Image (tube, rainbow, N blue to C red):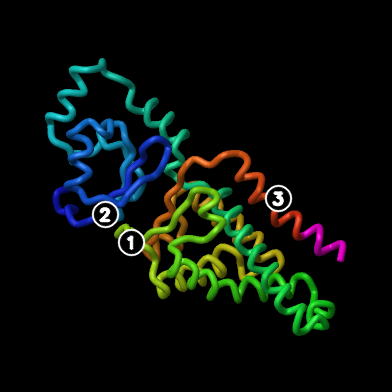
Amino acid sequence: MESLEGNAWFYIKNHQQQGPVGLFELKKLFEQGILPTETFIWSKEMNCWQMAKSLNMLPDSVFMSKKLEQPEENLASVWQELEKDTYPNGRPFVRYLARFFDLSLFSLVLMTFVSIFSPKFILESSGIFIFMLSLILYVLVEASILSIFGNTLGKSILNARLRTTNGEPLNFLTALKRSVFVTAAGMGFGVPFINFICFYYSYFDLKKNGKSTWDQQIGTVVLYGQVGLARILFVSLFPITLLIAGMMI
């Protein structure tokens, strides 16, 4: 593992996915007892999040002190409990809710702007066409937002953030590639029926691998933190409210 010294590392603390830190700093966190050896850690060289004590990367003194402090435990059961509590293998519903919130907000702004200058376009266009148009235009908008602010509003509300596997914020080109990939492979460009197939595939792909296909291909990672029920309800109800309002107009 020493060959990974220059890599960015991420870890889970207090139910929040933290990082990036270098390997030297990560080791110090364990040596000083700031992080327990049961902490989940991840870097781009790893296929999935793993518990630090299962990897041969920490000084023997760290493990010896822990063994003297507490009796032997069932690693598999502890791993399963921590994994359930800290979501290291992805949270597809959080990602979907954040994206639909951002898309709904962008669609509201776009339709308000268009209706001022060309109300006839809104009246003569179908809802599916407007959704697909918003989806395609949002690719550029999302890439710009990510490169400028480092995150979207929906992801910020749901305590999720995007980084490269090197721990850096996304630049415009990387964000653009990801947005195109998500729109195509994750949403099927909004084409009816095809988009449901894409949703289905991407959901189980994320649940199985812990990382989406586009994040693996582009070199990005989504970090999650705890989020309250009130935020989830707000993000969930916002698109539904807009849809109901649109049907009543």
The one of 83 and 100 positioned closer to us in this rendering: 100
Give the crowd class for mark 3: few <14, some 14-19, many >=20 residues within 10 Å: some
Question: Image point 83% across, 83% down: which residue?
Answer: 120
Inspect the image, locate mark 1, and give the three-letter code of the amino acid beneath it: Glu
Inspect the image, locate mark 2, and give the three-letter code of the amino acid beneath it: Ala
> Looking at the picture, does residue 58 appear above or below residue 243?
above
Q: Nearer the viewer, mark 2 or mark 1?
A: 1
Question: Image point 31% across, 20% down: which residue?
Answer: 73
Question: Image point 44% across, 37% down: which residue?
Answer: 86
Q: Quadrant of residue 60?
A: top left
Rounded to the nearest angstrom, the CA distance separating label 2 from label 1 is 9 Å
Give the crowd class for mark 2: few <14, some 14-19, many >=20 residues within 10 Å: many
In the image, residue 80 lies at what x, y percent? Answer: 42, 31
Question: Image point 41% across, 41% down: which residue?
Answer: 16
On residue 192, which mark appears?
A: none
> Looking at the picture, does residue 105 appear above or below residue 25?
below
Looking at the image, the residue that sits furthest to the right is 248
The one of 183 and 130 positioned closer to us in this rendering: 130
Which quarter of the image is occupied by the C terminus?
bottom right
> Dots 2 and 1: beta carbons under 8 Å?
yes
Callout 1: SS: loop
Give the crowd class for mark 1: few <14, some 14-19, many >=20 residues within 10 Å: few
Callout 3: SS: helix
On residue 8, which mark appears?
A: 2
The region drawn magenta spans 243-249
